[in-house]
Image: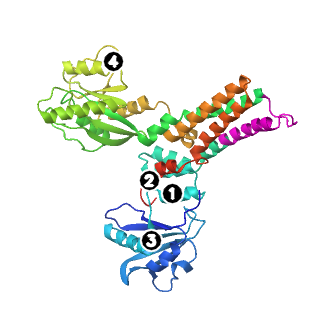
Amino acid sequence: MPAPADTIAAIATPLGQGGIAMIRLSGPQSLAIADASFQPVGAFPKPSAAPTHTIHFGRIMRRGRVVDEALLSVMRAPRTFTREDVVEITCHGGLLPAKLVLDTVLENGARLAAPGEFTRRAFLNGRLDLAQAEAVADLIHARTELAAAAAQEQLAGHLSRRIQILRDDLMKILAHIEAHIDFPDEDIAPDTRATLAERLQAALNFMDELLRTANEGRLLRRGIRAAIIGRPNAGKSSLLNQLLGQERAIVSPLPGTTRDTIEETANVRGVPVVFIDTAGLREAGDDIEAEGVRRSRHALASAELILHVLDGSEPAGEMDKQLLTEFAGRKRLLARNKADLPRRFQLPDGVAAIEVCCLTGAGVEELKDAIKGIVWAGGMPAEMLQVMINSRHEDALRRGREAAERAVAALRDHLGLELVALDLRQAAQAVGEIVGKTTTEDLLDSIFSQFCLGK
């Protein structure tokens, strides 16, 4: 794909009130646009004459009027994020100053960047491969330190290097096959079918290792959805507040306080968990309550974990028994609340619960341990963090594995080498999609459209 010829600009800091804001430009006209927009103060040179990786103080000028005082950073290609000339203008924070500076550089020849276009240029110019580019978005959206660590490992190229080794192995096997097809009478001593099959099986085993990280990758990037259920006034909202460490849900001794679902994300032992406080699952007394129950049922259908809160101070009622039976086949944890009061709720045989007190917080840490244990058994080895794949990688690897498996079977069944070569090409192409060796505009549009503006 050819390198872009225009110059893009965007506000690279979040919109809103703040101390400073930053506007980023990238492209061949960045310095010329900076010259037209920036007036140095004192002995500072104009941007196009400034040495690379220097910062200069001055004023942003538009139509002869001062827009704002600013610091302007000059970074010349190729030692930049995009491997293009880059200018970054740091001005006062707030919506208006940043917008006025952006309007100035757009008026002087820049084009407003699309979401993720700076990172896309870094990919197109060879600064990052596609897996590393995705890691930039993962790092921005990381909700736990573990997720950020995994993104940093991918950004450093650990996954990319292993994918490249895998693709190179497939290409070398393909080269042997094609050489034997093209020159069957030449004494080129190609590997035997058995040896080629063994080498290809080793590649399949490596794909399986990578595929085993897909579930953990999904957990770190997306988290899990945990629905909190129980009869009215069992303490669902109180438990949500304890898990979040803040008073998010209204708590009242009156049953039916929660009339809608409430969703909040918490970091539970390194795993992002979206807790959903549901309305009590009971016969609704009015249309509003009926809608709350309907939404609760919808949330339950999509939840990967059920947190069933029981009122330990009351005997089991019909609704308790109904919920215990209804969700017996789901991944769930039981929390017997009000452990500070005499226990009157008797659990069925073979059913265990964690004793908690949502008033004091007793047992909540044990519950967090249990949540992590049920969704993510075992620890997180450092080597797994380095190669944790995402859903796109998983899809590409599965397609590559299917093609490679067909090639192995064809070799072992002594089928024509042309069939083996066809499957190997498909396997190498699928694996290459992960790092962008083989890609399409539609795929790039899909990936980079998920980025924020200015990145």
Mark nearest the camera among 2 and 3 is 2
The residue located at (66%, 38%) in the rendering is 425
Q: Earlier in the sequence, mark 3 or mark 4?
A: 3
Write down the residue under mark 1. 119
Write down the residue under mark 2. 451
Using residue 135 as the reference point, say whether residue 347 is left or right of it: left
Gap in Å between the C-alphas at discs 3 and 4? 61 Å
Q: Amino acid at mark 2?
A: Phe
Q: Quadrant of the N terminus?
A: bottom right
Marks 2 and 4 in Cβ contact (< 8 Å)? no
Marks 4 and 1 in Cβ contact (< 8 Å)? no
Gap in Å between the C-alphas at discs 2 and 1? 9 Å
Write down the residue under mark 3. 89
Mark 1, secondary structure of its residue: helix
Q: Earlier in the sequence, mark 2 or mark 4?
A: 4
Return the residue nearer the eye: 236 or 339: 236
- Residue 52 within the segment the image draws in magenta: no
